[in-house]
Image (cartoon, rainbow, N blue to C red):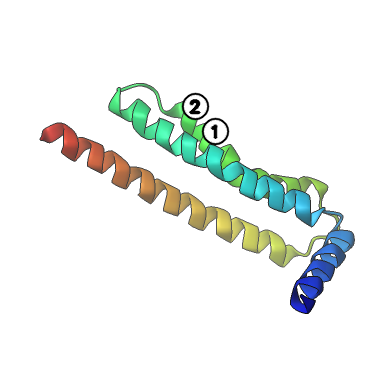
C-alpha cells in the first residue's frame, strides 16, 4: 500500500505543479479508448462499403489526442520536454494507427478476393 500512496502523492504533486488534474487526464485518456476503437472499426466498415472514411478518421484522431489537448490547454509551466514527449507519442501513435488500419483494410481486400 505504501507504493500506491507514494505514486498517488507524486501524481497529485505533478498536477498541482502544472495545473492539470491527473485523474481527469487519466479519465480522458482511458475514456477515449472505446471511442477510438469504435472509430477505427467504422473506418474499416466504411471502407468495405466504399463510403467516406473522413468522419471516422477525424473522430479517431480526436480520441487519440483528447487527453493531450487537455494537457496543452489546462497545463501551466509545462516543461518543453513534456511537449516533445507528447509530440513523439502522437507521431508514434499516428504511425501505429495508420499501420493497424492498413492491415485491417488489407484483410478486407483479401476477404473480398476470396
Report the side of 65 relative to 47 (left or right): right
In the rendered image, residue 71, in percent from the top left (x then y), is placed at: 75, 51
Q: Which residue is mark 1?
A: 59
Q: Which residue is mark 2?
A: 55
Looking at the rendering, in which quadrant would you find the N terminus? bottom right
Q: Is 101 situated above or below 96?
A: above
Q: Is 76 situated above or below 37?
A: below
Q: Residue at x 89, y 60 (%)?
A: 16
Report the side of 99 relative to 21 (left or right): left
Looking at the rendering, in which quadrant would you find the C terminus? top left
Residue most toward the left?
A: 114
On the question of residue 56 being in view, the answer is: yes
Secondary element at tag 2: helix
In the rendered image, residue 53, in percent from the top left (x then y), is placed at: 41, 28
Examine the image and state in which quarter residue 113 appears: top left
Q: Residue at x 80, y 60 (%)?
A: 78
Amino acid at each position: 500500500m505504501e507504493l500506491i500512496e507514494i505514486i498517488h502523492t507524486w501524481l497529485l504533486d505533478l498536477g498541482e505543479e502544472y495545473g492539470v488534474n491527473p485523474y481527469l487526464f487519466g479519465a480522458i485518456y482511458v475514456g477515449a479508448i472505446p471511442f477510438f476503437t469504435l472509430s477505427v472499426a467504422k473506418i474499416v466498415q466504411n471502407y468495405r462499403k466504399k463510403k467516406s472514411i473522413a468522419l471516422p478518421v477525424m473522430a479517431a484522431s480526436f480520441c487519440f489526442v483528447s487527453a493531450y489537448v487537455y494537457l496543452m490547454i489546462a497545463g501551466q509551466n509545462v516543461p518543453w520536454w513534456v511537449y516533445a514527449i507528447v509530440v513523439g507519442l502522437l507521431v508514434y501513435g499516428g504511425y501505429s494507427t495508420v499501420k493497424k488500419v492498413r492491415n485491417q483494410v488489407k484483410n478486407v481486400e483479401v476477404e473480398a478476393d476470396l
